[in-house]
Structures are given as structure tokens and as C-alpha cells.
Image: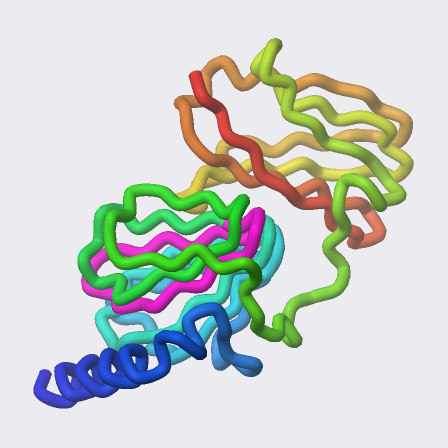
Amino acid sequence: MMKKILLVILILVTLNCTKSQAQCNGLTSYDLTVSSVTVQHPSSPSFTSAVVCPGAILIDSTNCCTRYIHIMPGGTYEIGGTAYAFVLVKNGGTFNANNSTMVFGLSYEAGATILNYSGPSTLCPAITFVPSSCTTEIEENDRNNFGNVFYNTINQSLEVKDIKENSELFVYDVLGKKMFEQHFSQNTNNAQSLNSFTPGVYIYHLISIKGKILTGKFIKTN
């Protein structure tokens, strides 16, 4: 317990001393890379730095240590329990603090989604860190070559169009719970109703038979 307290004090002092220079800068290497849905239970092995890749979800309640969490566009980080964190969020990333008091600072770019957080924060013109360990297989909607996914706010549906390869669609909530999955054959167009979904943030993965991944998120407001 004393070791944990000393570690927290040391990191707080370091953050305070480097506040003006380093608040919008992150690390360049990580001992945890999150590329899918990863749940860190209270007894899980500890880590000191993590990068949450596009389309990935990190749900963290590890009872250990202050750590740096770097969130890429399309990535989601959720903190709970007695996990400690200093969080950096790129435009398009999502951070759900769950009203935790264990977050020592938040740096974020405009366009980041911040939920249930009232602690210290800094809006950065740009956050610099190196997502060197993230996969390069994830493709964005405007440049993918095997399908498209759109959230239709009027019809409350998730539309899948222009499928060029047999694919599977998976949708998760921010807790990592799988809401549904569906197979789509080549040349299929489909609209999946979301009327039964409660308001909140959701993440989708469209995975082709050849292993290509199209990922993104949407917010259901009603």
C-alpha cells in the first residue's frame, strides 16, 4: 500500500513539474496494446502505459498503479474500480470516466468524446504520441474497399452497403458487451434496426472473410 502511495505521489509531482511542456505529449512505447475488446479485471496483471487502437475498447478496473492511457481515433477507454490513470484522447476517441476520482488528468483534442468526467483537463491543439504498435489493418469509411457502414439517425438503423466480400458485423456497447452480430454475403445491402438500443455510444466492426476490418462508432441519442 505504501509503495502504491509513493508511486502516485511521484507521478503527480512529475506531472506538475512538466505540466506546461508535456500535457499534450504522450509516450512512444507501451506495455499494453489494445486492438480489440480487452477487460482488465481487478486482479489482472498491471501495466504502466497503454495505447487503445482504432475500434478497440479497454475496460480497466485493475487495482494497481497510475498509468498513461493513449486513445486513438475510434478507440474507447473506460475506467472503474480503483484503477489510476492519466488519459490522452485524440480526436474521435472516447473516454468514459464513470465519475471516477482516480483520474489525475485528462488531455484531449477537439472532437474527442468525454463522458462522466469532472476532473482536471486540458484541451490540446494536438496531442502527440506514437501509436507504433497498433495494427494497420483497420480501414476508415472513406477509403475502405469492401463495404460501408452508416448510422441513420432518422430511421434509428445501422446501414450496411456495398459489400464486396462476405463479412460479419459486430456491435458492442462501451462496456464491451456484444449487442448483436450478423453475417452479410457479397453484394448485400441491409439496414439493422436499433430501436431496442438504449441511448449511448456504440462501436462496430465489419470484418471481411479476407480479414479486413472496417471499424467505427456512433452515438444513439434517443
Extreme residue toward the top, this view? 155
Q: Is residue 3 above or below residue 198?
A: below
Residue at image location 13% in from the left, 82% down from the top: 5
Residue 171: image quadrant is top right
> Is residue 115 visible in the rendered structure shown here?
yes
- Quadrant (top left/top right/bottom left/bottom right) for the C terminus: top left
- Residue 156: percent from left, percent from top: 57, 15
**At which x and y percent is residue 113?**
46, 43
Image position, residue 106 (x, y; %): 36, 60
- Residue 137: x and y in percent read 76, 59
Quadrant holding the N terminus: bottom left
Furthest-left residue in this view: 2
Residue farthest to the front, as pictured: 20
- Dividing the picture into quarters, in which one does residue 211 lie? bottom right
94 left or right of 45? right
Please name whichever residue, 45 or 202, is drawn nearer the observer in this view of the structure.
Answer: 202
Side of 127 where 163 appears, left or right: right
Give left or right: position of 176 versus 14: right
54 or 124: nearer the eye?
Answer: 124
**Horizontal relation, residue 137 to residue 87: left or right:** right
Q: Is residue 45 visible?
A: no
Question: Which region is colored magenta?
Answer: 75-93
Q: Residue 85 colored magenta? A: yes
Q: Residue at x 64, y 18 (%)?
A: 152
Residue 128 belongs to magenta span? no
Residue at the image point whose x is 28% and y is 61% from the top: 61
Vertical arrangement, residue 7 with respect to residue 138, above or below: below
Q: Image quadrant of residue 17?
A: bottom left
